[in-house]
Amino acid sequence: MLSLLTLVPAFAGTAGSSSCADLTPLGCGACTTKADLTNYECHWCEKDQACHAIGSLVSACTFSNDCVSLSKLSTCSHKSVDSCPASDAIPQQIHIAHAGEDADGNPDGMAVSWFTTKKAADSVVQYGTSASALDHSASGSAKSYLSNFGWHHTVEVTGLSASTAYFYRVGDGANEWSSVLSFTTATRSADASIALSVFGDMGYLNSTVRPMQVAVSGLVKDWSASYSYDVIRRLVDSGTVQGVWHLGDIGYTDDSFGHALGAFSYEAAYNGYMRWLEPIASRVPYMVAPGNHESECHSPACVTSHGTWGLPLSNFSAFNTRWAMPYRLSGGSSNMWYSFNLGPLHIVSLNTETDWPGAEEEHTGDSHQSNLPAGSFGAPGEYLAWLEADLKAAVAERAAGRRHWIIAGGHRPFRELEATHGALFAKYKVDAYFAGHTHSYARETYTIKSGNHSMLHVVAGGPGCDEMAQGPAVAADARGSMATTSFATSRYASGILRANATALDWQLLDSVDSSVLDAVVLER
């Protein structure tokens, strides 16, 4: 948890980490939204199509108002990112998630999401089973949760064939399109084998590329998420996994102040993270759960500009706008909780942050500042009632052989949830629970006290972030296996969950060399 109110005076007036000229390749939108604690710093000159500091004497617009700027110090004629050139409507940050549902409750499509810095005329996906014949299309909508900081598009493409490769591109339906990408739809057989990359708490790049300018409140100077990213990307590229399950703390955007002192960097960091993620998340479904680092922006810039940035970014607003999870189909109220079926699995994404008695973020966000409220995504008791109904239906499906395993995941380890969730997990005999949050790894057989039910409990919170240094290497004879009742490590690592009708197989992979650090199997 990071509370930075006391740090504001020390940061006041400090320049951001990059100059306006550095933003020229990123376009008008990135240029005009660069800001410090008190004001926007740059303008986009329409004459030379470049980004310049306010008042720059080298700008072709120095003595002209033919420019775009949000700065109160600027004489530019345009004061909105939507005045940027057409090139800022080019799609970026493309990512997909399971969507739709056939008669048997299996996903039959994808939610395709992307970002444009400028508002586009429409949100369109063209798709087909051949890269040269995108002969179908679907339309969706776009939302903006922070004025002048871009648009987040989502289109649901449903009614697709199972286990089939589809090619697609996204755009405005007229002029601006992405390149052609592809994904493969989910299996609809409960007896099929599937594999997922599972982890929580993955940061953005590393401290070499994004140097840490300050290490406070848990931030560390030397860290890396790049090792884990490379492993996960190889798993996707090779077809070893068919999806990703990221259990909260996505990119550590709220820690971005440590890399850019005095700047408003939240949105630039989130956009950068999503561009970094695109080669993975545009190819396989990238399913997410909320973590405490999704709750708000509590950087000095957001504290000093509470109404402009702090409040609009509170209560998981970025998380619930940027991602498109299948919550409506499963009866949830938002991305905060949902469930879906995948081959032999019924997967439940829990809300470990809000909407239950004792939830850490129920009344305020991660900083617990009273003017950054959080929680109440449903009526009192709605979330736990939903969870019981969902588990009850899943048990009936398991008993009928239409699903073989019930697994759940959320950001926090189960010990933090047991008082409110334990009885339900025991009653409906959840097979396994996966979490993050601890910036380390731990695996055990967890016995729920209230119902004397045991389940596999995995905390995979160590892929690397700017609050985690690398742990020591694990000797071959000290690694986990079926012979060890538990295993823990602080090594950078992520996991692979494999499942079929008779087995649930879990492996933890070292992020540096991909060696197996831990391996267990549950069998029917």
Image: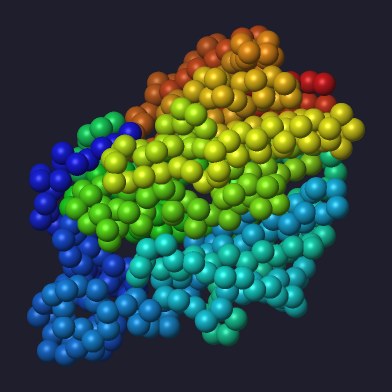
Residue at 37% in and 63% down: 146
Where does the C terminus fall, quadrant-wise?
A: top right
Would residue 52 be found to the left or right of residue 412 on screen? left
Q: Nearer the viewer, residue 122 or 304?
A: 304
Side of 122 where 227 appears, left or right: left
From what the image shows, is residue 129 above or below residue 220? below
Residue 138 quadrant:
bottom right
> Is 300 on the left or on the right of 507, as rendered?
left
- The reply to whether residue 513 is in sight is no
Estimate the x, y position of residue 46 in percent, counting from the top left: 28, 86
- Farthest residue, direction right: 400
Q: Is residue 166 visible?
A: yes
Q: Does 345 sit above or below residue 259?
A: above
Q: Residue at x 72, y 32 (%)?
A: 391
In the image, what residue occupies the spot 19% across and 41% down?
A: 5
x and y percent of residue 249 in the render?
44, 40
Residue 26 is situated, as x and y percent measured from the top left of the image, at 35, 69
Query: How far across and down, in percent of the image, does residue 509 sit?
Result: 56, 30
Q: Quadrant of the N terminus?
A: top left
The residue positioned 55% from the left and 45% from the top of the image is 378
